[in-house]
Image (spheres, grey):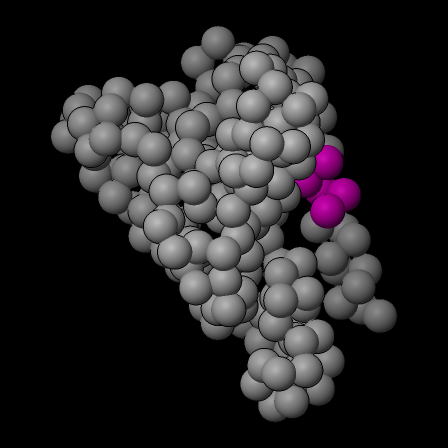
Amino acid sequence: MAKQWLVFAAVAAIVLVLGALVSVGTAASMVTFVFGDSLAEVGNNNHLQYSLARSDYPWYGIDFTGKKATGRFTNGRTIGDILSEMLGVSSPPPYLSLSPNDDAVLQGVNYASGGAGILNETGQYFIQRLTFDDQINYFKTTKERIRAKIGEAAANKLCNEATYFVGIGSNDYVNNFLQPFLADGQQYTHDEFVELLISTLEQQFLV
């Protein structure tokens, strides 16, 4: 029960922080980096040739601007899109759509990938997806590209003042622990699995 209250408190804190950001109104120079799974993806998996977790079918995006599939696992906007709009900034593009020298990295990047989880083995039967570790490594690459463009001090300032959105963890249950043919559900009790997720997440630093 204590852990459940801890999670609830963390979610409440995030909501309060977002509310404060919206009220401040500093969106003009705000940079956002998005990490997560299909709830936040905006098209990374479309750039993975063998991924079975893709949302490029015609009905995806029918309620989105342009009414075309964009790689979002929804008929409209994602959570990240909604938060970006609340913050008054454009929703950042998928990392895999950018060229190495693209200046768009200075405005933020979306690394989210359908099927991803906290654990690297989560969603493995989708063949290709960006695990959370992959996303963090791509963020490190992004920081290097930003440093090359604007210098060490300016890059550190940009990243330190950026807004980060992380929405991940549901696939660790839906596409891992609760699947009878995957090892984790057989190897761990529920409490042990929760401990595994928490300890893994604690070691996955973004910066």
Percent x, y of residue 118 = 53, 62
Place residue 205 in its image quadrant. bottom left
Q: Relative to residue 203, is residue 134 depicted above or below?
A: above
The answer to whether residue 12 is magenta is yes
Q: What residue is at 66 percent from the left and 24 percent from the top?
A: 62
**What predominant SS class does the magenta segment belong to?**
helix
Q: Relative to residue 29, is residue 147 depicted above or below?
A: below
Q: Relative to residue 179, is residue 134 depicted above or below?
A: above
Q: What residue is at 51 percent from the left and 69 percent from the top?
A: 125
Residue 161 appears left or right of 70? left
Percent x, y of residue 171 = 62, 61
Q: Which residues are magenta?
A: 11-15
Outermost residue, bottom direction? 187
The N terminus: image quadrant = bottom right
Q: Count of labels shown?
A: 0
Outermost residue, front direction? 58
Q: Nearer the viewer, residue 127 or 207?
A: 127
* Residue 164 appearing in the image: no
* Residue 60 appearing in the image: yes
The answer to whether residue 169 is magenta is no
Percent x, y of residue 164 = 51, 37
Residue 204 appears left or right of 152? right
Residue 6 appears left or right of 131? right
